[in-house]
Image (cartoon, rainbow, N blue to C red):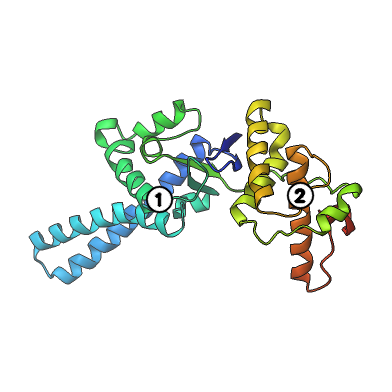
Amino acid sequence: MSQIVTGDAVLLDLRPARVPSMLLAAVIDIALITLASSLFGYVISVVAGGYEYREQTMTMIGSIIIAFGYPIGCETATRGRTLGSWALGLRVVRDDGGPIRFRQALLRGLTFWFADFAPWTGFCGGLICASINRQSKRIGDLVAGTLMVRVRSPRRPPAIPPVPRELADWTSQLQLSGLPDELVTASRQLVQRYDDLLPYPKEQLAQELARQVAARTAPAPPVLLPAREFLAAVIAERRAREQHRLAGGHVPTAAELPQGWR
């Protein structure tokens, strides 16, 4: 298990992929690339009509395009997945947990063929690097600042604590329209992962998030609340309103909801 705290104070519960899974995903991708290159070569042999030099040149160019274009294109289009990683339930993310973009996919694709799976590294440079790296990063991940994680069977996060009855009147009056989704996500992740963090980072993160949330909500709580309790009350109230808004009914406060709905 790997917990990552991003620059925006978002806590991420990520599961780095294991080396055997990464190896099998790479084998699948290489097999698909080989198959596509062979099919392309067959088509060229038919189209070229006996011009051996032209056939070889076009086949080589096409194979290079397929070899580099397949992983780079797939990871860019799907934000971190090739067919091999999809089959194994894996995804590539940035070190801060965000989805990768073309730049990261390009660096990973180039490094794969020039370092991870290159003749001068014995075709196992990436395997050796992933085996000794704590987060199973291959050379391409180190260069691109990425991490391959498992996306199947994630651990269910703890429930948001319910709003205390003495705060029900306050939360029912909260103006929450100024809260951006990113800040809500960061606050929810902090509250849910609070007990798993070290004391110093979590207190600092909670104070900073509470300051940002307080600046975007009104009115202020009737009593001075610890940062975590303040965030939990705001998030529970916002979630309660969203759930009933989607249901098309009355929008109650979080204190009016059954505990299981929070």
Sequence-first disc among 2 and 1: 1
How far from the left and from the top, in percent, is residue 256? 89, 59
In the picture, the disc for residue 80 is: none
Q: Which residue is mark 1?
A: 29
Q: Residue at x 74, y 63 (%)?
A: 242
Which of the two residues, 199 or 210, is positioned nearer the viewer here? 210
Vertical placement of 226 versus 240: above or below? Answer: above
Q: Callout 2: 10 Å neighbours few (<14), some, many (20+)? A: some
Q: Residue at x 59, y 52 (%)?
A: 182
Circle 1: element type: helix
Q: Position of residue 129 (x, y in %)?
A: 40, 29
Task: Measure the C-alpha gap from mark 2 to mark 1.
Answer: 55 Å
Q: Is residue 70 left or right of residue 224?
A: left
Q: Which residue is mark 2?
A: 220
Question: 248 or 218: nearer the eye?
Answer: 218
Tag 2: amino acid: Ala
Q: Is residue 68 left or right of residue 82?
A: left
